[in-house]
Image (cartoon, rainbow, N blue to C red):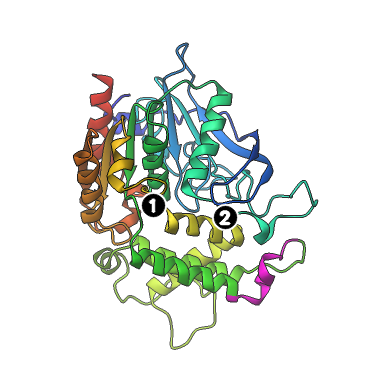
Amino acid sequence: MTLDPGAEARHAPAPETSGKLHHRIGPFEPELGGYLPEVTLAYETWGELNSARDNAVLIVHALTGDSHAAGDPSAGYKRGGWWNPVIGPGRMIDTEENFVICSNVLGGCSGSTGPASKNPQTGRPYGMSFPLITIRDMVRAQKRLLDDLGVKRLSLVIGGSIGGQQTLEWAVEFPDFVDRAAPVAATGALGPQGISMSEIGRRAIMADPHWQEGEYYGTGRTPDDGLAIARMAGMVTYQSAAGQWERFGRRPARRPALHRELGGRFEVESYLHYQGRELAGRFDANSYLYLSRAMDIYDVAAGYDSPEEAYSRIQADTLFTGISSDWLFPAAEVRETAEEARIAGSNARYVEIESNNGHDAFLKDWAELREAVGPFLEDGDNG
């Protein structure tokens, strides 16, 4: 896995994608109960699986992400793949050496089975009858996809935020399947401040009269206002105070108004309005409820006697990456998680990205991300 050499790699051609594929993994029983008679996962791949079938890299997306981790801007993806600067020939995750996979998570709304999917037993969308999904369920579903694709071992699993939670769970749940794990901006359990902000977002969706108890499919009315407010609340958790002063300050808005004004608008308000409307145009509100709840209730120790027992299962070389200005998953808590895993006997390290961009730094600060994670990937290549 080649460390990004800098400008030359950034100007290298974008990796060739398989395009979005869909694979049925069969029936699925979530760990907290319920039953899904048929589950489909949407996924994309880059690179080729080697003859030993052990050069696979799993990329795990964040809350409102999808399987399109890499690729240049296109009609369907105006900004390109959400991690494109670090995936591709000669980039941090080298598609000439690795078979790279990214799947839309179980419960999502970008091709994988979720609340908007049709229940084959009723012929209608699941809505709120969809069973509660956990991080462990997402990982177990991904494992079945990889098994069906013929992957024998993961060279690396990596992701940030809810993707970082899945990365950690991969190392715990399937210790003999993962060589390296790199959770970014994530811990073994989200703190109360993050849970609180998630709940505000969920209540905004449920308070929207167009939500209709989750049965809005086919009615011509969707809870766009509630989802937009949920996104606005979420975006606040992804920023930092210093970063917002730097980016917005108290400057008046320059974007066109999307809502009725009350005494004018600040640029930061206009930014939140735009982000809310953008998400409402591409994401399912019920999926937001389910995925945000999975993020909240994740506890690496669930099913074990203690966090130490869970962490002791990890066999992969593990790098925890914190972000200095992150208050959703504070750097101190990420560092503490790495230390807990190390004390439990795993080969765990910690590195920190210095940035004012808050939680979102892993989706913005490409040079800093390469500097933090690249050497860990190089160490794995060199044994």
Sequence order check: which comes first, mark 2 or mark 1?
Answer: 2
Image coordinates of residue 264 in percent, x first then y, are 43, 84
Q: Which residue is under mark 1?
A: 299
Q: Is residue 243 above or below residue 367?
A: below
Left or right of 39, for residue 132 = left
- From mark 2 to mark 1, how far is it between C-alphas? 15 Å
The residue positioned farthest toward the right in the image shown: 123
Which element is circle 2 on? loop
Residue 254 visible in the shown view: yes
Q: Is residue 266 above or below residue 350?
A: below
- Residue at image location 40% in from the left, 69% down from the top: 196
Q: Verify whether residue 28 appears in magenta.
A: no
- Residue at image location 46% in from the left, 72% down from the top: 200
Q: Which residue is under mark 2?
A: 132
The residue positioned farthest toward the front in the image shown: 305
Main SS, magenta residues: helix
Q: Which residues are magenta?
A: 207-217
The answer to the question of whether label 2 and label 1 lie on touching residues, with beta carbons closer than 8 A, is no
